[in-house]
Image (cartoon, rainbow, N blue to C red):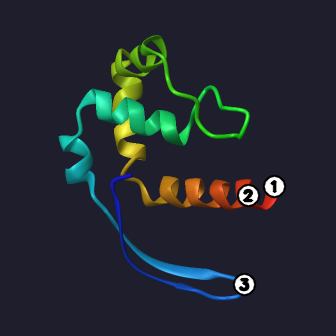
Amino acid sequence: MGIEVLGYSVMSNQFHCILRSRHDVVETWSDEDVARKWWLLCPARKTKDGLPAEPTEFELNSIRNDARGLKEKRVRLSSISWFMRFLSDAGEYRRES
């Protein structure tokens, strides 16, 4: 994601982090980069292990060819709110495994 982690502290029941949104970095990514990064975070298909399946060209094109959706995904990829959401989801996944 287009987020820099400038610092963090992990405690027994919580964590604190200092984050910086990097809209400028995300804007330099190609549509292909955005589609692949988004797929890794929000795959439509997963492997038996629960990991993102390798996207097909059709699946990547469905992301790349949606101009409005692609613009929204660029914003989300540099959003601290979305970063925290994905981080929380990853924690849930680890507890389930």
The picture places residue 47, in percent across and down from the top left corner, at 67, 32
Q: Residue furthest top?
A: 58
Mark 2 near mark 1, Cβ–Cβ under 8 Å?
yes
The residue lying at 64 percent from left, 56 percent from top is 90
The picture places residue 38, in percent across and down from the top left corner, at 45, 37
Name which of mark 3 and mark 1 comes first in the sequence. 3
The residue lying at 39 percent from left, 52 percent from top is 1
Mark 3 near mark 1, Cβ–Cβ under 8 Å?
no
- Reply above or below: 93 against 43: below
**Residue in front for this viewpoint, 29 or 47:** 47
**Residue in front for this viewpoint, 37 or 49:** 49
The residue lying at 39 percent from left, 30 percent from top is 35
Which amino acid type is marked by label 2? Answer: Glu
Image check: 65 left or right of 51?
A: left
- Reply above or below: 26 against 15: above
Which amino acid type is marked by label 1? Answer: Glu
- Reply above or below: 56 against 8: above
Say which element carries label 3: loop
Which amino acid type is marked by label 3? Answer: Asn
Image check: 64 left or right of 29?
A: right
Select label 2 or label 1 by which is in front: 1
Which residue is the site of mark 1? 96
In 3D space, how far apart are the residues under numbered discs 3 and 1 (Cα atoms)?
A: 18 Å
Which residue is the site of mark 3? 13
The picture places residue 59, in percent across and down from the top left corner, at 48, 17
Q: Residues within 10 Å of mark 3 (few under 14, many from 20)?
A: few
The picture places residue 2, in percent across and down from the top left corner, at 33, 54
Which residue is the site of mark 2? 92
